[in-house]
């Protein structure tokens, strides 16, 4: 039948009818599935999709993947293959690769070596402090090494005391660290020789605390932990009246180890405290070791020197080993320690390829992922911690990783390292200790958190109310308001799943 056989009006009616039919055809060919309260998959899907329709995600990106922990079968997907910034969920990849590559019993060592002859308690030569990546060294450890030297009969060093951090390369920061993050503890420089201020083991940092003076008008009292001459404090503070504002700033000047403390603090007010990353942390370790030698009564005639390399002829005097990796995983994962992640990446590169660099270490991570069947080709990995805004990982690959690692012999250590929702013990609940209280997720959800500006992530394990263990990965990017509550709502929904 041809259109010219009809009148002009008839032609218009037929054209309109055909146009309407063509526009409706795609919808007619894809029937809508109704939500059935007895259909467990559709019920779960509808609940999760409704949560993800939150207006906070308007203009944002969300990737979600939920699997059965028993079979690995995908139960829910939402932009599951979209490459997104994972933030600290990147640590899930790093920790798994490190456990597989290094082993759960892997330890970092620190050595003290002598290049010269010992005569009558005097070392006629130089003393080397050689770091091999230990991020847990504290003031007490350097004191212990000095004591061991004293017990071995060393009374004097005629030469220099030299720091050797050549176990890794000399690139201190991963390539995407922003300028304004460089002096913050969470972006501390990475060195094979470093020191931490306390048992959180934020290596390469010092804790600077300002306390009010006894009298109004006086400068605040500033304390540094550990006590060291390696940094310089510039005190520009003032103690003010009890009813006045506390406004203290603690910032390291770029390119220096000068830390400026300024502002006001009320009489009888609470302290202000900040963890500050130092420049060239091997110098901090060297200063603490040199100080420990002095305190132990061991004289040093020479100077403190950075950037040395221990000669092959040097003799080992003292060796200090760190805790095993399975124990380091607790502060690393529970507290989301960025420095530990980057040290592990460099250590994997050193052990596997003989080069302690980000490039070689990340190659090891990618090889591990590919080896267990996770699609590393769809990712972009730029660091081990997730600090980079250039990392790209799909939620589906994270949930797949969490399924695959269940078969690894070290899985229990891996699982134990994850934060636990609502557990207020800092080294149990970690970064989830204040979340999901008084719900079925409390004490149940074990998951890694992640947070950057405009990025939040949560991936891990939960046991549903019906007894089924589920794996989930949630990555949210490019939102303007906080979206952490959306993650929590999804995790709680999974904990309540009882179909």
Image (cartoon, rainbow, N blue to C red):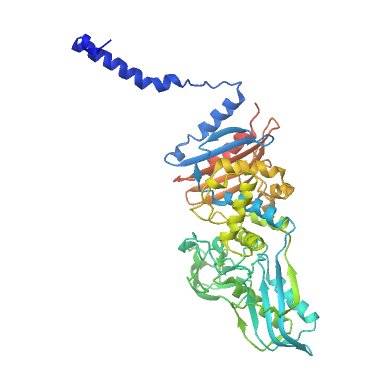
Image coords of residue 269 (percent x, y):
56, 64
**In the rendered image, which quarter is residue 128 located in?**
bottom right
Residue at the far front in the pictured view: 1
Q: Does residue 127 appear anywhere in the picture?
A: yes
In the image shown, does 272 or 430 lie closer to the viewer?
430
Q: Does residue 91 appear anywhere in the picture?
A: no
In the image shown, does 227 or 471 lie closer to the viewer?
471
Asked whether, in this view, residue 236 is left or right of residue 348, the answer is left
In the image shown, does 176 or 279 lie closer to the viewer?
176
Which residue corresponds to the image point at 64% horizontal and 47% vertical from the top-left? 371
Q: Quadrant of the C terminus?
A: top right
Q: Is residue 2 above or below residue 165?
A: above
Image coords of residue 462 (percent x, y):
66, 39
Q: Quadrant of the N terminus?
A: top left
Image coords of residue 126 (percent x, y):
68, 84
In the image shown, does 41 or 97 lie closer to the viewer?
97
């Amino acid at each position: 039948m041809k259109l010219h056989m009809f009148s002009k009006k008839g032609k218009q009616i037929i054209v309109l009818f055909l146009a309407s039919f063509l526009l409706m055809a795609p919808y007619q060919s894809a029937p809508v599935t109704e939500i059935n309260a007895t259909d467990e998959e559709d019920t779960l899907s509808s609940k999760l999709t409704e949560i993800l329709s939150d207006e906070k995600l308007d203009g944002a990106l969300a990737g979600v993947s939920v699997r059965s922990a028993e079979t690995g079968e995908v139960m829910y997907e939402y932009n599951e293959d979209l490459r997104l910034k994972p933030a600290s969920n990147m640590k899930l990849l790093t920790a798994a690769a490190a456990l597989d590559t290094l082993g759960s019993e892997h330890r970092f060592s620190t050595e003290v070596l002598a290049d010269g002859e010992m005569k009558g308690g005097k070392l006629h030569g130089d003393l080397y402090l050689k770091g091999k990546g230990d991020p847990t060294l504290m003031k007490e450890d350097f004191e212990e090494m000095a004591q061991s030297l004293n017990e071995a009969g060393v009374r004097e060093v005629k030469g220099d005391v030299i720091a050797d951090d050549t176990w890794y390369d000399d690139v201190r920061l991963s390539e995407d660290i922003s300028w304004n993050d460089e002096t913050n503890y969470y972006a501390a420089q990475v060195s094979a020789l470093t020191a931490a201020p306390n048992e959180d083991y934020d290596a390469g940092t010092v804790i600077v605390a300002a306390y009010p003076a006894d009298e109004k008008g006086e400068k605040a009292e500033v304390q540094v932990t550990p006590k060291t001459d390696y940094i310089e404090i510039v005190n520009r503070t003032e103690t003010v009246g009890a009813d006045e504002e506390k406004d203290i700033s603690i910032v390291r000047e770029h390119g220096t180890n000068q830390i400026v403390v300024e502002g006001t603090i009320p009489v009888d007010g609470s302290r202000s405290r900040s963890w500050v990353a130092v420049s060239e942390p091997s110098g901090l370790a060297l200063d603490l070791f040199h100080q420990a030698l002095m305190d132990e009564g061991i004289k040093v005639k020479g100077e403190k020197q950075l950037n040395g390399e221990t000669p092959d002829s040097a003799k080992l005097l003292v060796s200090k080993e760190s805790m095993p990796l399975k124990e380091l995983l607790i502060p690393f994962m529970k507290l989301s320690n960025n420095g530990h992640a980057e040290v592990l990446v460099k250590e994997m590169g050193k052990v596997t390829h003989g080069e302690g660099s980000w490039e070689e270490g990340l190659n090891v991570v990618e090889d591990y992922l590919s080896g267990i069947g996770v699609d590393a080709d769809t990712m972009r990995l730029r660091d081990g911690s997730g600090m980079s805004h250039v990392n790209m990982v799909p939620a589906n690959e994270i949930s797949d990783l969490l399924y695959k690692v269940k078969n690894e012999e070290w899985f229990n250590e891996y699982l134990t390292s994850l934060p636990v929702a609502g557990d207020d013990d800092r080294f149990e609940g970690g970064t989830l200790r204040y979340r999901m209280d008084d719900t079925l997720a409390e004490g149940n959800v074990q998951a890694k958190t992640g947070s950057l500006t405009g990025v939040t992530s949560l991936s891990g394990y939960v046991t549903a109310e019906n007894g089924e263990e589920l794996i989930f990965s949630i990555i949210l990017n490019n939102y303007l308001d906080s979206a952490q509550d959306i993650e929590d709502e999804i995790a709680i929904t999974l904990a309540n799943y009882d179909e």
